[in-house]
Image (tube, rainbow, N blue to C red):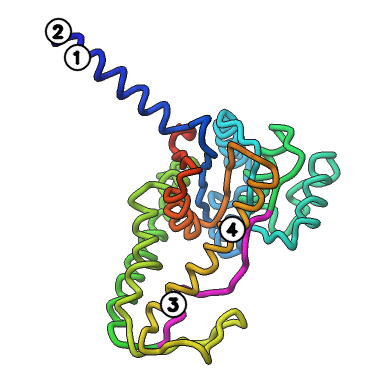
Amino acid sequence: MKHLYTILFLLTGLLSATVSQTRPDKINVILMGSTHFGQEGFYKQGPSMDLFSPGRQKEIADINKQLAQYRPDMILIEREPSEQHTVDSLYNLYTSGKLQFAQLSYGRAEQYQFGYTLAKQLNLPQVYGVDFYSSLPTRLMRDGKNLDKFIEDLNKFSNLGRSFDQQLKDGQLSLKQYLLKLNAPETLQATYYNIYINPARVTDGSFGKADKTVDTARIDKSHIGAEYISLFYNRELKIYSNLLSLQQAHQSKRILLIMGQRHAAVLSKILEDNPDFNLVPLSSYLK
């Protein structure tokens, strides 16, 4: 009888693990949080940081081969819906063999190396932009009570990201391992804490230079940290709304969403709270 219980326990665990990865009764989503590989500040650090290098291209091919096993029926990237015409034009040129990513100044970007490449492999008709752009620097707060503690924690978090970059540069991490570190639960939680939790401790302050998306005349300075969080969260909710609209329009059931890592940290929590969705860990497919 003891052996029977052991077998049943193992079978239950295996079934639970399988169901937690993909569920046919849910809208499955893999969120791949990424560094912006196309930025000069990243790829000009050295040959090992350049996704156009032969070694990195081999790694990208391996990553896309594993992601293809997920069989996404929709791939979403960090471009705005208003830019869909450009997204479609570039994708059509790429799939017809008339465009090489090296021809694009931002061709190393994750949206091309993973989004476009994988979509072509899977014969998907389109790649969709889901972003809502807003230029919000993480160091937007200029002054305020408890600001020093917030900055101290933010610096520690920034150092964590830089340590990942350095490990990739030095060859201690493969590109796959680097992406898995960015998307590890503890890294996503650290991102979420520093951008969406910790700032609320800052009060009685003000913002520095902000873009037109920030109406400084309506800012409650006594709750400047909460205002900071609301600005960042507002963008994520609009990205989430764009995702819902596209899913509804195309009735997709297996979505791959490729965004900056900061977006993945909060969108993962929003999607987890939606009972219609099942969040599939990236690590389920990247082995």
What whole-number distance in Å separates the C-alpha atoms at marks 4 and 2? 52 Å
Q: Name the residue under label 2.
A: 1
Q: Name the residue under label 3.
A: 228
Q: Name the residue under label 1.
A: 5
Q: Look at 54% across and 39% down and name the residue there.
A: 27
Inspect the image, locate mark 3, and give the three-letter code of the amino acid beneath it: Tyr
Q: Are there few (<14), some (14-19), or many (20+) residues within 10 Å of tag 1?
A: few
Residue 52 appears anywhere in the view: no
Tell me whether the residue at label 2 lies in contact with that at label 1, contact meaning CB atoms closer than 8 angstroms. yes
Inspect the image, locate mark 1, and give the three-letter code of the amino acid beneath it: Tyr
State the SS at label 3: helix
Q: From the image, which quarter does the C terminus lie in? A: top left
Q: Mark 4 points at which residue?
A: 241
Q: From the image, which quarter does the N terminus lie in? A: top left
Q: Does the magenta stretch include residue 59?
A: no
Q: What stretch is highlighted in magenta?
A: 129-142
What whole-number distance in Å separates the C-alpha atoms at marks 2 and 3? 59 Å
